[in-house]
Image (cartoon, rainbow, N blue to C red):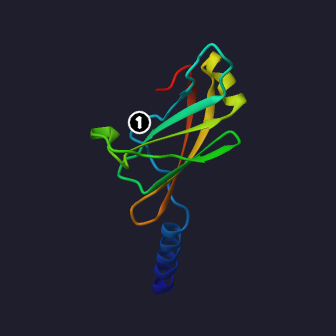
Amino acid sequence: MRRAWVFVVVLFVAAGCGGSRARLVLPRTPYLGLACRNPTLACTRVGLGVWTPWRARRVTATVGRSRFALFTSAGRGAYAGGRFWQGFFRNRSVAAKAARFAPVRLLLVVVDSAGAAHPAAAIVRVSQGYG
């Protein structure tokens, strides 16, 4: 009987380990802001900057109804290639929140060098400037 209980406990623990993944913890809060060359005109272009805890292979983001891929380039330290990612998208409702510094929900998927996807989520405020 005791062996049966040990087997059941080991089975539940093993099932729990392979089930759902914990959300990725980002080393810095992502930055989201208007990215316009001429701030006097109505701007709907928004920039997003994300720092990952390790060199990532790919990062995708969803903000509101906008889903897009981010890009990385050579840099140093926290801005090194594969560690700092940025992307741009157009979204009127997100851009309108910049005037109020209002929050939006950000969903990320960070793919590591082995190809495993790690989800992350954050609530970030939209700033009036990016870059």
Identify which residue is drawn at 57% across, 26% down.
125
- Percent position of residue 13, x then y: 48, 70
Q: Quadrant of residue 20?
A: bottom right
Count of marks, rendered view: 1
- Percent position of residue 17, x then y: 48, 67
Q: Element type at marker 1?
A: loop
- Percent position of residue 63, x then y: 63, 40
Instruction: Out of 92 and 97, give the one closest to the viewer.
Output: 92
Instruction: Out of 96 and 124, give the one closest to the viewer.
Output: 96
Whether residue 104 is situated above or below residue 101 in the rendered picture? below
In the displayed structure image, the side of residue 86 where residue 53 appears, left or right: left
Identify which residue is drawn at 32% across, 39% down.
78
Instruction: Out of 15 and 81, give the one closest to the viewer.
Output: 81
Residue marked by disc 1: 28
Identify which residue is drawn at 63% across, 13% down.
40
Mark 1 neighbour class, 10 Å CA radius: few under 14, some 14 to 19, many 20 or more: few
The residue at the far front in this view is 38
- Percent position of residue 45, x then y: 62, 30
The residue at the far left in this view is 77
Q: Give the amino acid at mark 1.
A: Arg
Whether residue 54 is situated above or below residue 89 in the rendered picture? below
